[in-house]
Image (cartoon, grey):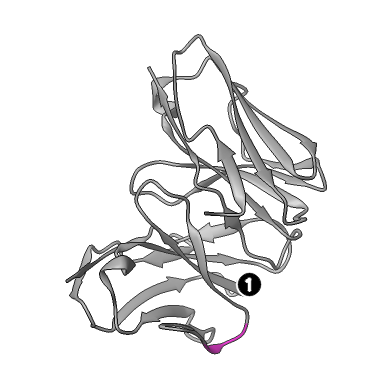
Amino acid sequence: QKEVEQDPGPLSVPEGAIVSLNCTYSNSAFQYFMWYRQYSRKGPELLMYTYSSGNKEDGRFTAQVDKSSKYISLFIRDSQPSDSATYLCAMMINTGNQFYFGTGTSLTVIP
Amino acid sequence: DTEVTQTPKHLVMGMTNKKSLKCEQHMGHRAMYWYKQKAKKPPELMFVYSYEKLSINESVPSRFSPECPNSSLLNLHLHALQPEDSALYLCASSPREGGSPLHFGNGTRLTVT
């Protein structure tokens, strides 16, 4: 079993839809949770960074962490064609430099 | 534009060539990383430098040789690569070891012929 599981999609939604992206994990030692957006032929861009359980909002993006269920989500409201990208979740334990990535979900927002 | 700058953006090299990838950050971050990413896969860790010292080498073949000349610069020296080494090579930095997120550059797309 992988440490981090993420549905690879692809996911295709109409413009304006609410998008839900999810990752599950098995290691209860994970304490830090990140979401990255990666456009084709670019590096991953940090979107959200959270530590505790609960919700964190930034503009149209909301990151949700449920440590009891070992489940994290990224919600995108009013999705735009410019949101079309691959979204990677990542996690880390408090110490050390090891980041554990999901496989990424490919999202297309159709105008 | 990202705050982690990588050069070159593209590189084509033969199996007998020697080349170097360069990475620079001016955010004052003390940890720097090399990752390798194949198409439709997540980044795979290669090396970590913390305070300019190599702290992690993920059993990377010796044809890849990292170097950290100072806290802002990270190089990856390439020699005698194989076609299967073709990938996107990503540099990243973080403020410190542990508990802080990675900031990636846009990568060098390497093709080995």
| Magenta stretch: includes residue B113 | no
Vertical relation: B40 (above or below) B88: below
**Residue at the (82%, 48%) spot, across then down:** B51
Q: Tell me, yes or no, if residue A1 can be seen here.
A: no
**Residue at the (38%, 46%) spot, across then down:** A41
Residue A85, how many percent across, how many down?
Answer: 33, 61
Q: Tell me, yes or no, if residue A78 can be seen here.
A: yes
Residue B14, how many percent across, how many down?
Answer: 44, 13
Q: Nearer the viewer, residue A77 or B48?
A: A77
Amino acid type of the residue tagged 1 in the rendering: Ala
Which element is circle 1 on?
A: loop
Residue interval drawn in magenta: A52-56
Q: Main secondary structure of the magenta part?
A: strand
Residue A101, how many percent across, how many down?
Answer: 49, 59
Quadrant location of the C terminus of chain B in the rendered image: top left
Left or right: where does residue A56 sit relative to residue A81? right
| Image quadrant in which you'd find residue A84 | bottom left
| Magenta stretch: includes residue A54 | yes
**In the displayed image of the protein, which residue is found farthest to the bottom?**
A54
**In the displayed image of the protein, which residue is found farthest to the top?**
B16
Chain under disc 1: A
Q: Dot 1, how many residues are within 10 Å of its Cα: few (below 14), some (14-19), or many (20+)?
A: few
Residue B49, how many percent across, how many down?
Answer: 74, 44
Which residue is labeled 1 in the image? Answer: A29
Q: Nearer the viewer, residue A27 or A16?
A: A16
Vertical relation: B1 (above or below) B10: below
**Residue at the (55%, 49%) spot, across then down:** B105
| Image quadrant in which you'd find residue A80 | bottom left
